[in-house]
Image (spheres, coloured by chain):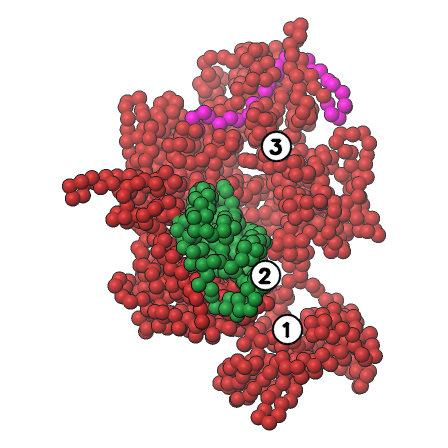
Chain colours: A green, B red
Amino acid sequence: MTESQTSTTEGSATETFEPLIITFCCNWCSYAGADLAGTSRLQYPENIRIIRVMCSGMVHPNLIIEALSKGADGVLMLGCHPGDCHYLDGNLRAQARVEAIELLLDDLGIERERFRLEWVSAAEGPRFVEVIKGMIKQIKEVGPSPYKQ
Amino acid sequence: MISLTIDNRKIEVEEGLNVLQAAGKLGIKIPTLCYHESLKPYGACRVCLVELIWPRSSNIQASCVFPVQEGLVVRTNTERVLKTRRMMLELLLARCPDVPRIKEMAREMGVKESRFTKKNDGCILCGLCTRVCQERMGVGAINFINRGSDRKISPPYDKYSEICITCGACKVVCPTDAVDLSKVTLNKPKSIKSEFDANLAQRSSIYIPYPQAVPKVPVIDRHTCMYFLKDVCKSCENFCEANAINYDQKDETKELDVGAVILSPGFELFDANLKQEFGFGRYPNVISSLQFERVLSASGPYLGQILRSSDQKHPRKIAFIQCVGSREVDRNYCSSVCCMYATKEAIIAKEHEPDLECHIFYIDLRAFGKGFEQYYERAKELGVKYTRCRPSAVREVPATKNLILSYYPDDSEEKKDEEFDMVVLSCGLNPPAGARDMAKLFNVELNKDGFCRTGKFTPVETSRSGIYACGPFVEPKDIPETVMEASGAASKAMGLLTEARGTLVAKREYPAEKKVEGEEPRVGVFVCHCGKNIGGIADVPSIRDYAKSLPNVVYTEDNLYTCSSDTQKKIKDMIKEHNLNRVVVASCTPRTHEALFRNTCREAGLNPYLFEMANIRDHNTWVHMKEPEKATAKAKDLVRIAVAKARVLEPLQNRFLKIVHDALVIGGGLSGMSAALDLANQGFTTHLVERTGELGGNMKHIYYLVDEKYEPQKELLSIIEQVRNHSHIKLYLSSNVKTIEGSMGNFKTTVETQGGDVEFKHGTVIVATGAEEYKPKEYLYGQDSMVITQVQFEEKIARQLLSKSPGSNPSSKKQELVATSLPAGQVGNPDLGSVNSVTMIQCVGSRDKEHPYCSRICCSMAVKNAMKFKKLKPAADVYVLYRDIRTYGFNEVYYRQAREAGVIFLRYKDDEKPEVARTNGKLTVTMNDPILRKKIALNTDLVVLSAGTAPIPGNEELAKKLKVPLNQDKFFLEAHMKLRPVDFSTDGVYLSGLAHSPKNVDESIVQSCGAASRAATILAQDIIELDAIVSEVIDANCDGCAYCIDPCPYHALILTEYMKEGSIKKTVERDLALCKGCGVCQATCPKAGIVVNNFKLSQLMEMVNATLEPQE
């Protein structure tokens, strides 16, 4: 839980539940898409914290497991659309790991819905916002992380 | 400095500010109507009321006219303040019940209805207009007149002002849009149209010319700025917090010594005003294609919404009219790009609004570029309508401003009138304004249309040596060809400047790097206000103070602009003063500013990789503008996460690659030879590998060009001669590339020659392996000797010309050349003596299911051969059966000439291919003529098939060796279709000629020179510096499981073994030159045996943990 959430998580649990979602953005497409959302002044809820990586393909499954087992309510991984990867096919490698990650989540009793992989290009500011809002909605439905400290 | 408290927040501000300004610095917004930064406050509207809290009392004051005082306590949102403001709004609303801004403000404050008597006025008497006119413009054309309820704004004596300068400042500042200049003066105002928005929008006198401007800073238009015109205003100075406005900048004249000049002034769009029949300029909803491009743009006049100019409504039906200012008697050329840009605009428009109807009216649809035919097909699938008809005029329906077009739908006899909401004119490309002056200045020739004259075999050389030209200044062309030509011109210039290469480069010196290994992290955090972009929303001082509380942070400060040069210096000073060994900047995005700050660190002796950024603007204040508290809290989180990573950052050294200066060119056709010659002329040893026994490739079969002044075989012989005799070219004939190892700067290649294998090292590769003529399976080809291809036809004509030229001297040089180049074996019927009618069929092996691409050159080739044959036998019948004639650019001239010479062009429909049959010894071609709507049969002596260009079968094998991709059609695929047309995505490997896509002689030469130019950017360097963000094998952790090897997209990893303490240790080795740092290996490794520097799993883990850290 972070500072911005302390005020809102007090009170009745589900009504005011504001999830914390760690978002891995690749440097070339989705991070730029997030920048574009900013430049275009598109407004979205503040529930996400973006961690920049060079490619969605570099995000180790352990990183996702660590985040979710230490209390993140959700993890969103954003990469370039297939065919657009700056590193030829790093994004497809990321996609190939999704199933393994989901199995690991099952083992830990973490809902699969807490993790999601999506493609957002550098030109898709509106889509970035749409994906973020969708993920927040999804996590709100799942509820707070059982691992929340 | 004066300290005061506003809404329980303390702030220190300079003396002389008012309470409204002080609140602004805290990001507290106080509503106001009559306050303006560049004018003296006046306190007229009374909306900015605040409550001043004194020890024993409080009172309500207009904040804009109350100066700050030491210890002042201000409340901006007490019930008393809000109640009084509501009363003010009620009064204003009574006066101006219909002004949107007042209504909106009233609604926001909870005022629904005014209890006072309504008066229908637009003016709230705030006096902004009179103040700006007097204070800023020094004119005083308007002022308050009368008293009491009759008070109003007017010119003196209520008469038209004669002194008004129509600057429009009064209109701009008016909060209620109540100023009507036509009631103030009879002087005519001039609106300033935005050039970038193609006059669809207005701009101010100080403006950023376009969103991608470099540098992206505003400029002042001296022709419209009131300061430059009348020595008044200077308002912008007041707004600029960075004090960056400089009115004293002057144009400078600089003298440069140069060895070569490249002219690339671009083009100008055809002025649609010259086509009055389409109503451009008269009918608001007829716009040019460039204007429509702006309409579609998110940064355009309607922010990406498709709206009509007349009523700002969404159109439902748009018509595009092609060839406006192209393919006509005055401008007898095709602009080459309009068919595709219209298609693109139609697709994008439909993406914006799927129900929109887009209807393109064209003559021939010229989708001849790489991938264009498929794009055109996609447009049709998406529902873009294409009609082959050119409407002759556009009429407007006055009531609706809709537009009526008359046309014949799809070859029908019935004329149809159709109403459209909007018409887009696909305007052609003209030579740039000023081209004639430029030509005069540089003493270069232009052609009759005003484009720069160059040669087919010297496509970037102007008529004056040392001066080169590129882009649409030479001929209308698309982006890829422009980029190729630009590189080609650079290559030619570099050939002249070889000796001077690198002599003007100033090397940047950096201080010695200080050692930080083993030191406790000492982090400095710099938080940026970014003017009001961050500071206007989030509480920057509190973010700064929070940063101070984080572990290892020893220094913090906040800056108005952290990227300004004075702050850069400050950062360097602080690194030294506080012995900082990590720097965090919390500001904007690393994608634009990381390089700048890394360089700052480096200049202060700190390793540039000990820097981290927190993006608290693009990802925070800009996207949470209405939640300042949440934005502040999130910014703190982002700073904490950045500091967590900074603490574990490690110094990294950039990689240095030694470059082998030799080049490899694969393919000895026109492209390969042109590339090799350019490289050799620049001084690089070039290995030229040709699989056949002789140089020349497809060029050997070109005996004449449509422009008769050229002698292709003579040119070819001269090029072959130069290649053979060049001291820097090593030629390998009848040879094949066997293996290529290594990467940019350091390739090692084995070539299989007749004399055995040869191995050499080189720094770059150019692929120029060409293509071949498609071998037709259709139209009796191969079965009937009188059915031949265009290449075979050309050979026959050349032979016939040779035997026919009466009284010619058999030893004439020209004849000799043609004679020697003609093949010994003869194709089909030996001569054309008995041939009196020829029927050509276009698109054989192009634009069909098997070959979905357009072969680009066949239309021009058919025109060329048809004209040549007509010249040989003027009485002969020549028919060309086509789908679209794609004689783009200046080839259009010859299409017209061919028709004038009597060549008959007959169109057949895509799904009604002609049929060729031989019955009773007669060759007959039958087809459906869509215009006559009849089946016609042509008895013909000869059928010539315009066979397409096919990729060579060897492409796949070579692509594998080079690890580069092919496209669906099996041509080589470049790194970027538009912007990097000669590069592969693999560094150090380039592409040219037919191996890329079908193209003609000059285009092949251009691309080859472009490829040579791109290769030379690598070869000219001794050492190349590469980013340090690459993977690193941790040998101690690696157990040689090899999981990482296959996924690596760059094949940069190999499994090796070595002896360790008497046993075999398996480990992975990483090729530094191949690795690009994507980190796929890192995510695959179960043992942390391979990591990516700067993005190590452990470093990312710190960031995750910092994100989840519980906060007080």
Residue receiving disc 3: B887
Kind of residue at badge 1: Lys
Q: Reply yes or no: does residue B948 show up in magenta.
A: yes
x%, y% of residue B234? 59, 74
Depicted B935 relative to depicted B487: above or below: above
Mark 3 or 2: in front is 2
Q: Which chain's residue wears label 1?
A: B
Depicted B478 relative to depicted B643: above or below: above
Task: Say whether mark 2 and mark 3 are on the same chain.
Answer: no
Residue receiving disc 2: A43
Mark 1 or 2: in front is 2
Front in this rendered view, residue B320 or B593? B593
Q: CA distance from mark 1 to mark 2?
A: 43 Å
x%, y% of residue B137? 66, 76
Q: Which chain's residue wears label 2?
A: A
Residue receiving disc 1: B230
Q: Is residue B682 left or right of residue B266?
A: left
